Amino acid sequence: MNQSIKQNKPRKPWLALVLGMIMPGLGHVYTGQLMKGVPFFLMFSFLIPASILLGLYAPDSALSAIVFLGVLMALAVYIFSIVDAFKSARMLSYTYAVQSYNKAYVYVALFFFGYFFVLSAFTSYCKDQLLEAYKVPTKSMIPALLPGDHFFVDKRINCPGCKYKVQRGDLAIFVYPNNRNSVYIKRIIGLPGDTIEGRRDEIFVNGKSIRGEKVTSLDAPDMNKLLEDYIAYLERGNSASYVVLWKKDMKQESFSVVVPDGQVFVLGDNRNDAHDSRHFGTVPLRDVTAKAKQIWFSRSSETGIRWRRFGKLLSGN
């Protein structure tokens, strides 16, 4: 009789709620539903990585939508698991036969295993090998990227077995040569062995101009105001055509560079307001870590949210 009374420990709904909030499925373990808690945890853990993989292999225009659908589904699983654990605990608030795993150290062990060996591992893998999000802080890449743009980058570039090799025209993320704790985004202009020349407002690669026609209209009325102070030209790389800006009535410095082996030459699209290879030299190819993919959010400190930039592709600017 004493043993039976000792094992009867009604569940506390508030504790099931807290455990469920700490980690999906943990509240179910507390209420004796181990085989229900594990699927909740696995669904929550896999949904976002799976959506990232699916988004990267889907058409480029679908990336942001697929990733955010995965985030919403993971959030729905998280909320539903909390509510379900709370309801289960309420049903067991008068009587509950304690299971062998209903011990504090088991909950702690499950949390540490789930967080450090599953969730953190998935997060690190996705961030290091698949997809990462960045925000634009400067004007150096106008008009392709504006200050306040948030965008995804594809990490499957420039490594053995990766999908992409670095090409001229890529919008690339790289480690800043003068401070390895910083990353920059610039346009790849020259590859190893290329001769890059700048003459006035024209760039030559291996003796051939990459400048196209003059651009008389940008993609938004507020951006067209830039054309009062800048001249815009279309340039062509191997992977993309893109618009660059040069300040009017400003003397352009000439330069000539032969890109060393294992290096790339980068420029900002906003040519007179960019800190690039004209200032810090070429960039080691091994330091190119990602390729810009798509804008997923954009907000100006002056005009607010820029809805029309949501979903804008960056791989073909």
Image (tube, grey):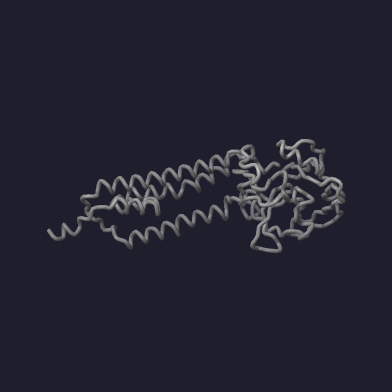
| Image location of residue 55, percent across then percent down | 56, 43
Image coordinates of residue 139 in percent, x first then y, are 71, 49
Q: Which corner quadrant holds the C terminus?
A: top right
Indicate the quadrant containing the N terminus: top left, top right, bottom left or bottom right.
Answer: bottom left
Frontmost residue, 191 versus 142: 142
Q: Which is nearer the eye, 78 or 123? A: 78
Quadrant hosting residue 109? bottom left
Residue 316: percent from left, percent from top: 69, 41
Give the vertical position of 260 relative to 251 (above or below).
Answer: below
Which residue is farthest front? 302
Question: Compared with residue 184, is residue 226 higher up or lower down, i.e. above or below?
Answer: above
Left or right, residue 212 beside residue 299: right
Residue 108: percent from left, percent from top: 36, 61
Q: Nearer the viewer, residue 246 or 32?
A: 246
Q: Residue at x 33, y 60 (%)?
A: 106
Q: 259 or 242: which is nearer to us?
A: 242
The total number of labels drawn is: 0
